[in-house]
Amino acid sequence: MSGMAGRTARRVGAAAPLIALLLALAGNAAAFDPGARGPQGAVGSVEVAFSPWDDTEGLVLRTIGGAKREIYVQAYVFTSRKLARALIEAKRRGVAVEVLADGEMTVKGFRSRIPQLAEAGIPVLLEVRYDAAHNKVILVDPLLPENAVVTGSYNFTYAARARNAENVLVLRDNPPLARAYYNNFRRHRDGAVPYGTALPPRLDDPSTKWLRRE
């Protein structure tokens, strides 16, 4: 072997561990699909409303009313009677409805509609892993081509509709975006606890007895 060939072989040999590591990382990256990330294509439509001037609640109600198969809700505070009624009516017409709610706000929240949803047979889980489960999201048929993602600053409350300065954004018919939100919902659902079961110690006190079912 010539001197140059020997030096080349030694360089390749020294780099082998690094090459192996890079190939392994590339393989792992290909195997892991976190859903849509980065810029999304400008497909579908966007509708926006601002409270207290616009009918923000009406926009959310119309979106819920258009559901064909599934509705997934992530709520921080939920006290709106109209939205609770719309979800219950959707379930009665055969739409699958699931709700994730912030555990602490559900326990402390005055006039929360979460018990009403649970009584109607809607699966409700409480998020207790975070300081605040601050998502305000409604997914309508996220696995269908015709879908909707409702998001923004808007809590599902009367105050958000009539007293606060809030925004609601409805993004329709963007399957990659809807799938990304759906995957995030599933991730949060996996870490939540069923409504009505014993709660972690920080919520398990005498004032929360009404929350638990025997």
Image (spheres, rainbow, N blue to C red):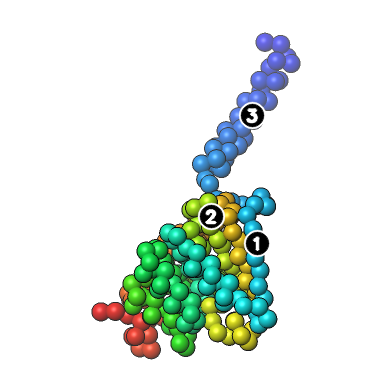
Q: Residue at x 65, y 73 (%)?
A: 49
Q: Nearer the viewer, mark 3 or mark 2?
A: 2
Location of residue 156 with respect to 97 vertically, above or below: below
The N terminus: image quadrant:
top right
Q: Amino acid at mark 3?
A: Ala
Label pair 1/3, CB-CB below 8 angstroms: no
Q: Is residue 127 left or right of residue 62?
A: left
Left or right: residue 123 versus residue 177 is: left
Residue beneath the point at 44% across and 72% down: 87
The residue tagged 1 is 46
Residue 168 relative to residue 193: left or right: right
The answer to whether residue 48 is seen in the rendering is: yes
Q: Which mark is residue 108?
A: none
In the rendered image, the vertical position of residue 104 relative to residue 40, given as above or below: below
**Among numbered discs 2 and 1, the one appearing first in the sequence:** 1
Q: Quadrant of the C terminus?
A: bottom left
Give percent across and percent down for residue 22: 60, 37
Q: Which residue is mark 3?
A: 14
Which amino acid type corresponds to the residue marked 1 in the rendered image? Val
- Give the image location of residue 60, x and y in percent: 55, 71
Q: Give the number of callouts.
A: 3
- Bin the neighbour count of mark 3 within 10 Å (Cα to Cα): few under 14, some 14-19, many 20 and up: few
Contact flag, marks 2 and 1 (Cβ < 8 Å):
no
- Mark 1 falls on what kind of element? strand
Where residue 195 sits in the image (x, y, percent)? 37, 74
The location of residue 196, given as percent across then percent down, is 33, 76
